[in-house]
Amino acid sequence: MKTLLTILRREYLQRVKSRWFLVSTFAAPLLFVGVAVVPIIVEMGREEAQRSIALVDRTGVLAGRVEPRLEEVGFTVEVAPPGSEDSLRVQALEGNLGGYLVLDEDALARGHLTYYGPRGPGAIRGMSIRGVVVQSALEVRLAEVGAEVDLEALFAGGSMDLRLLQEEARGTTEDEPEFIGVFVGAMMLYMVILMYAAAVMRATLEEKTSRIVEILVSSIRPSQLMLGKILGVGSVGLTQLAVWVLCGVLAFSLGLPALFASRPELANPEAIAQALPGVGLLALFVTLFLGGYFLYAALYAAVGAMCSTEEEAQQAQFPIIFLLFPPILLLMPIMEDPHAPWAVITSMVPFFSPVLLYARAGAGEIPFWQIGASLSFLYLGVWGMAWVAGRIYRVGILMQGKRPTVPELWRWVREA
Amino acid sequence: MSSSGLNGLPIRLEGVTKRFGTHTAVSSLDLEIPKGTVYGLLGPNGSGKTTTIRIIMGILLADEGKVELFGGPPGIKQNAYVGYLPEERGLYRKMKVREFLIFLGELRGLGRSEAQKKAMDWLDRLDLTAWAEKRSRDLSKGMQQKVQFIGTVLHDPEVLILDEPFSGLDPINQEVLEGIVREFQARGTTILFSTHLMDHAERLCERVCLISKARKVLDSDLKELKRRERKGLVAVEFEGDDDWLRGPEVLEIQEVGDETHLRLRDGADHQAILRRGVAAGVRIDRFDLVEPRLHEIFVRHAGEPEKGESLEPSWVGAGEGARP
């Protein structure tokens, strides 16, 4: 037990202290955030003048609706009477005004407006302005014919309530699942599992090629050595995930409000909240990550133990790649139809379930018994895989030279 | 580490056989290594030395026979009292020297601060203090080997098992290592080392076991072995007539430079020749019973050590029947 901890600790500390870990853990999110934030900061400089605009309403009916909406998305709006365009032009050229909008019959007919300014309003602001005008024009038109419509809701893309008819399927009664969020989550699971499981293979190979392993196995059982390495690398993975979650939480609690304060037109908190997984889904994510990681890590450890060089290992891991294809190929279809019989069956297969069960659970409520069964199979698979891999590891780790054939592998497993 | 609870011979093998497929690597080997002995396991490359040592360490399982370390079966528990330097030895290239040694110390059951202290003491002794915070890959090969050796002895083992410890070392480091082995010998540590370099064995060993083609051909006290293997060779230097040399005891007389070499009949008494010389009034400057070099004994029993055939590529197949 103590030696297991020694192995685990070395594996963990060596990795966490490595430059690669620091870069991928901290630099990646920073880069990501930077890409989003830097242009905004750069733009701050020209904010004040740009944000103040004048509105010339030649229709006489739009200004009342357009002005408050533009104020809402962060503009300072001054309504100017038609005919004052010349003085507005001078103000804009002197830099006292970002620009001015002219709305005429075209605005009511087809949402067309003209923006006059020394520079354009920028792509995102231009979109906000157009959106405001279109929505206002529609409202005016609809009011003319006396229709009562919640345009806000229509413009947000509408919404859908889901009521499942089968009693057993009724887990939760959440509204419309967010497609993108689930898809990104499933892909993330896939990549994180793969990344860390493959790291176990390289770590095993490193000990083999550097010949340190003979010293190690004189003090620790090979199965314990394998377990220590898998746990060590897995802890690194969890650490990285934790850092990322923390970064995400910080970004949402501190970064986003600051962002919205400077650019209210970007704010759409509802859409963002919808893209985030709920607590239940998050728990499932972690459970599936651990199960999938252990399963693939054991497999990769066995591959590392049976090879002698990096090149050999690249070839030998090929069969594992085949195991990884189905979940990716089935990801989209299963989100489309999470309750099809084939979907239920494939999400029970241990090598596929980490990705597919998550996709199903995210895309629609699935019965608890299916989640329970899938997780049971997954963890049973982990146990079986660890047993087989441990035996291959024990024999392979001291071998140099030719890679074993499949019958030889089978003999190792049987006789070890 | 205290020796309490350790009973019996440090190392005992009885009828140990190990096969890899159709190839027999070790064939019914008996070995008894008493406490405090420096024991040399000699043999050509591929004669089964490394396999024997791996069986003793419990890394490989014997197909037949019995292995005991301190009276118990080999394995992790007993290995805590053993310092093992494998032939194929490695380092974590990216790890710092001090961290690596602490890691090895902890693996062998030392506490962290204890391992740290011992590591620094040893680094100091071997002039490596300045390298403690360097990564292993930045060290020269000789320094890496010193670090590996420190890792072997860090936990003050009762038994040292060194597989080809001198191979790959430059003469200066060979001497350093020899000095340390002698020091452990003086402390009463039992030392088993394998080598195909006879010079070291000759200088260090109290007992030697010679294996060739998986079989033990000799197992004896080194002094006694040399006495037994003398084969009646006498080197003489003298002034005067050489008639006194001829007699029933002498088979052959050979001039080798200034010396004359006599080959005596089996069981003949060299004192008779000496008496004849004195009686003849010859001035005898030297009358020397030539001790055979271990190298010659080795060649006589196993063929040229350096050109020994390599039957078992040292790692291939080593895993079959590894420890349960």
Image (cartoon, coloured by chain):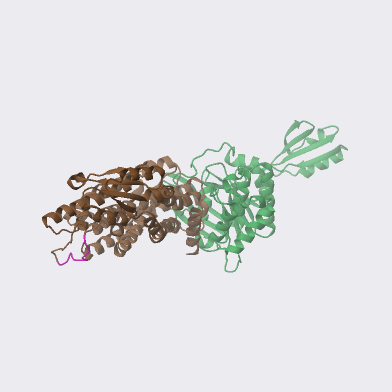
Chain colours: A brown, B green
Q: Is residue B241 left or right of residue B200?
A: right
Residue A171 is one of the magenta-drawn residues: yes
- Bounds of the magenta span? A167-175
| Quadrant in the picture for the C terminus of chain A | bottom left
Classify B260 as above or below A255.
above
Residue B298 position within the rendered picture, expressed as x and y whole percent measured from the top left: 62, 42
Q: Report whether B94 appears left or right of B241.
A: left
SS assignment for the magenta stretch, majority: loop
Q: Residue at x 66, y 55 (%)?
A: B122
Q: Residue at point 69% right, 48% down?
A: B176
Q: Quadrant of residue A150?
A: bottom left
Residue A139 locus on image (x, y percent) = 18, 54
Q: Is residue B97 above or below residue A371?
A: above
Q: Is residue A78 left or right of residue B14?
A: left
| Residue B49: image location, x then y, percent | 54, 47
Q: Is residue A295 above or below residue B138?
A: below
